[in-house]
């Protein structure tokens, strides 16, 4: 069968034509190719057109080595990891202007591997541009960025004067050891919570973390509250006050006190506390400390989790701590019950006959005790426990428990192993920490070394603790060193160690591997814009739902015709307008014209909040720093200019729809049918006045949006700072946001309402026989006909709308933006 002829369809006897792809010859080289509008093959097009011409091949980027952040001109610094999407975004922003000028679009980008010490970052871009009668040409283009090291403002201040901190977190625990801080240190390193600290200093009873921003300190406090039972108090000290800009500079202090109960502590519960906890105790062991305290009755295997707030009510102390553990040898063991699992840990009740190791060769004192370690202990094993028989206790609750109950003479806590000199195949990372003179004393250094060694032994014995932190391979470990380790001593499973991380200060990348390539599409690059788009959309939707009925009544009052002498106006007031609207159009009449703003709410609010965000980035001296009220006014004005061009056609369609009922009688008399929806209104306007008719009233719209948004954002930020007591407003609640947003909306309409009246009457005016020649003429005629009151028609509904609508807008925006990060 010949190509292109018909083929019989299976089982039907019908013939179905087969499709073939035709080819033409290139008009330059004569090669057969698929047809395109240029009639040239891809090779010939590339030979004649270079879409990468003018796109830079070399650029520079500024990098702060102390905080691993990059300069985003003019003054913002953004943290970004090697070959990360954040770094890709920073680099591509440097190319936005030349690409836009050349009308070249970016379809994809990826990193090309470069040596870390070369101070070079290489990108491979895939560019697209339309050439030769709608032919789209794609080309790859390499760009090399030279990395220049320079300290950011915060790091430069910290190096010139380390005491230039803004917030400090004072972490304390009143216990005779530092086991808790060793564990928290590993958690902070694993989750990167201390990476933003300017410095960390050891202090008596704890650690001090110094930060250049209050928000960084607050983030550390929030993290500590999730991993430990803590109680936090805050204070601030005024450092300086600028009377001109009304800027207050404070030093903030967060005092974080950790509950003094630690793992393996023995606690004697008072009769009242024991009853409140369901008859637990009276002697209990602390087996786990997270954001709650897990208490175990070693004689009954009952467990109770006590939250920090509940603990502060009882406020009991440890009768004996891990420093007072005594070593015993197990002489005999008899299991009482089968092994059970509680909260992921195994326990088994048993009777054990034990003797103190220190008594060997001196006396034959033995103890028969009940223990929860029956699954671990065997005759001949060593165990650590609390000696209630010979302990000198100074605890009223323990004395009460001894008088009321028959307490065991020994409480075994954990299995012990012979302490032999040994090396480990693993090691831990440590925080760079400043030590004071007291901590550098010889006795204190030896004490800390012993505590650290005991902490390492705990990690080997307890897999639950090991699971929460990162362990690293020790490259200096040699297998022949393991010969000194006994068979019964637990060792670290090799699969739990992290292999590909060097702990040295001068970390080197693996030179043999290929660089990771991250293909980043344009929608990923514009992460901030997308977040503002989503948050602005949610805020705009909240504004429409809450405020559109008020807006409908406002426009009806503004646009109603001036009554003839001796006649009453169509609407006597706002309440009368609501009644007539519901009577004639039903409740849906209050939401008439909502389609136009709803269709553009995403673009409108995305533009408003995105331009405001970009203005804030330009005005902000360093990342994360709050803006002053004056800077927020400037940012709001810039956003107002941008949104005016989108607001004008939207407002025109909405106003003409909302004013239809007021113009219905005139339209009926002239036999003209009124438009039925937003699209119908737009078609009608374009038919009468062309595309420029949609921008009727642009001048008064800009006169409303620019000063209105400037005042609104200034009042919003000023109110938040007043309620927060400073520039840091990150901890304000929803009630404060609602109050700030409502007040900002009210001030918006107070400042620009006459301009909005002029805009409304111009936009509902007839195109063929206009009553007003311009904004000034409309202002004069309204003032001549109705006086000053005419400039405030519908002011009541507008003010009634502005407070709840703007409160809903800002609240929805802040919540959504915070959730998106």
Image (cartoon, grey):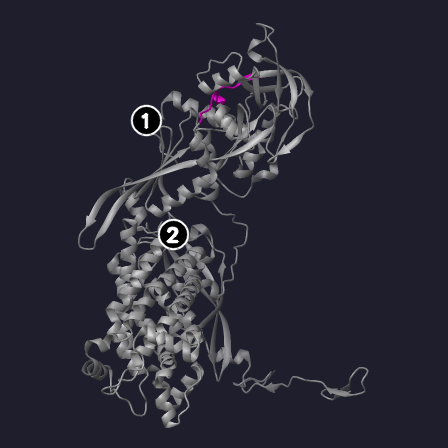
Whether tag 1 and tag 2 are in contact, CB under 8 A, the answer is: no
Q: Is residue 644 magenta?
A: no
Locate residue 637: give its quadrant.
bottom left
Q: Secondary structure at mark 2?
A: strand
Q: Is tag 1's residue or tag 2's residue first in the polypeptide sequence?
A: 2
Q: Position of residue 619 (x, y in %)?
A: 28, 60
- Can residue 223 be seen in this snapshot? yes
Instruction: Give the answer, above or below, for where 683 lies relative to 362.
Output: below
94 or 725, which lies in front? 725
**Dot 1, crowdedness within 10 Å: few (<14), some or many (≥20)?**
few
Q: Which residue is mark 2?
A: 69
Locate residue 94: give its quadrant.
bottom left
Instruction: Give the answer, above or below, for where 584 lies relative to 510.
Output: below
- Can residue 699 be seen in this snapshot? no
Q: Which residue is mark 1?
A: 437
Q: Tell me the quadrant of the picture where the N terminus can be found.
A: bottom right
Q: Position of residue 564 (x, y in %)?
A: 25, 87
Q: Position of residue 141 (x, y in %)?
A: 47, 68
Per the rendered image, the range of residues in magenta is 316-327
Q: Secondary structure at mark 1?
A: loop
């Amino acid at each position: 069968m010949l190509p292109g002829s018909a083929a019989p369809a299976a089982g039907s006897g019908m013939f179905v034509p087969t499709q073939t792809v035709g080819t033409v010859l290139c008009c330059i080289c004569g090669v057969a190719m698929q047809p395109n509008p240029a009639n040239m093959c891809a090779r010939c097009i590339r030979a004649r057109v270079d879409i990468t011409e003018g796109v830079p091949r070399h650029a520079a980027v500024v990098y702060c080595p102390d905080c691993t952040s990059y300069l985003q001109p003019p003054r913002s610094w953004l943290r970004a990891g090697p070959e990360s999407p954040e770094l890709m975004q920073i680099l591509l922003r440097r190319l936005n202007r030349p690409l836009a000028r050349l009308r070249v679009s970016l379809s994809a980008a990826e990193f090309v591997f470069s040596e870390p010490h070369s101070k070079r970052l290489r990108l491979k871009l895939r560019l697209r541009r339309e050439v030769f009668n709608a032919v789209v040409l794609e080309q790859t283009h390499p760009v090399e960025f030279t990395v220049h090291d320079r300290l950011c403002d915060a790091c430069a201040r910290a190096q010139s004067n380390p005491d230039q901190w803004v917030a400090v977190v004072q972490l304390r625990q009143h216990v005779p050891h530092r086991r808790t801080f060793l564990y928290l240190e590993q958690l902070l390193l694993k989750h990167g919570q201390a990476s933003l600290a300017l410095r960390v200093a050891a202090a008596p009873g704890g650690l001090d973390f110094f930060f250049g921003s209050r928000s960084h300190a607050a983030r550390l406090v929030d993290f500590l509250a999730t991993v430990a039972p803590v109680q936090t108090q805050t204070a601030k000290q005024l450092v300086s006050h600028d009377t001109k800009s009304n800027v207050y500079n404070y030093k903030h202090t967060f005092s974080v006190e950790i509950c003094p109960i630690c793992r393996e502590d023995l606690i004697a519960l008072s009769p009242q506390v024991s009853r409140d906890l369901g008859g637990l105790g009276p002697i209990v062991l602390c087996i786990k400390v997270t954001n709650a305290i897990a208490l175990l009755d070693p004689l009954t295997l009952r467990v109770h989790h006590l939250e920090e707030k509940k603990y502060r009510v009882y406020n009991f102390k440890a009768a004996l701590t891990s420093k007072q553990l005594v070593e015993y040898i197990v002489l005999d063991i008899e299991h009482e019950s089968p092994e059970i699992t509680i909260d992921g840990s195994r326990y088994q009740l048993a009777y054990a006959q034990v003797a103190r190791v220190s008594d060997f060769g001196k006396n034959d004192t033995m103890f028969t005790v009940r223990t929860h370690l029956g699954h671990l202990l065997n005759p001949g094993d060593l165990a650590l426990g609390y000696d209630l028989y010979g302990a000198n206790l100074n605890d009223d609750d323990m004395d009460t428990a001894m008088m009321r109950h028959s307490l065991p003479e020994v409480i075994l806590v954990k299995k012990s192993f012979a302490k032999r000199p040994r090396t480990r195949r693993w090691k831990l990372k440590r925080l760079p920490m400043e030590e004071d003179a007291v901590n550098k004393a010889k006795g204190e250094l030896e004490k800390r070394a012993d505590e650290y060694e005991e902490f390492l032994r705990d990690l080997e014995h307890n897999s639950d603790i090991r699971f929460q932190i990162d362990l690293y391979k020790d490259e200096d470990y040699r297998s022949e060193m393991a010969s000194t380790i006994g068979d019964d001593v637990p060792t670290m499973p090799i699969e739990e160690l992290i292999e590909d991380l060097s702990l040295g200060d001068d970390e080197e990348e693996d030179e043999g591997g290929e660089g990771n390539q991250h293909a980043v599409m344009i929608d990923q690059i514009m992460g901030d814009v997308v977040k503002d788009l989503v948050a602005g959309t949610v805020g705009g939707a909240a504004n429409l739902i809450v405020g559109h009925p008020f807006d409908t009544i406002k426009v009806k009052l503004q646009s109603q015709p001036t009554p003839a002498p001796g006649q009453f106006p169509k609407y006597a007031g706002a309440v009368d307008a609501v009644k007539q609207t519901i009577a004639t159009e039903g409740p849906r009449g209050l939401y008439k014209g909502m389609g136009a703003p709803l269709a553009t709410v995403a673009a409108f609010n995305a533009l408003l909040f995105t331009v405001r965000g970009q203005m804030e980035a330009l005005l902000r001296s360093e990342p994360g720093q709050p803006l002053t009220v004056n800077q927020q006014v400037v940012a709001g004005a810039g956003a107002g200019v941008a949104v005016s061009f989108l607001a004008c056609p939207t407002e025109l369609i909405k106003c003409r729809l909302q004013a239809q009922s007021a113009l219905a009688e005139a339209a009926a008399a002239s036999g003209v049918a009124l438009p039925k929806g937003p699209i119908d209104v737009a078609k009608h306007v374009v038919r009468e006045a062309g595309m420029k008719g949609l921008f009727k009233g642009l001048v008064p719209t800009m006169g409303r949006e620019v000063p209105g948004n400037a005042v609104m954002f200034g009042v919003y930020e000023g109110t938040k700072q007043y309620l927060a007591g400073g520039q840091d407003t990150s901890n304000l609640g929803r009630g404060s946001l609602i109050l700030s947003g409502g007040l900002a909306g009210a001030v918006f309409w107070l400042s620009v309402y006459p301009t909005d009246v002029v805009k409304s009457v111009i936009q509902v005016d007839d195109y063929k026989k206009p009553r007003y020649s311009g904004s000034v003429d409309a202002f004069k005629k309204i003032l001549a006909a109705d006086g000053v009151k005419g400039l405030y028609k519908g002011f009541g509904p507008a003010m009634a709308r502005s407070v709840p609508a703007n409160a809903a807008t800002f609240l929805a925006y802040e919540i959504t933006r915070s959730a998106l990060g």
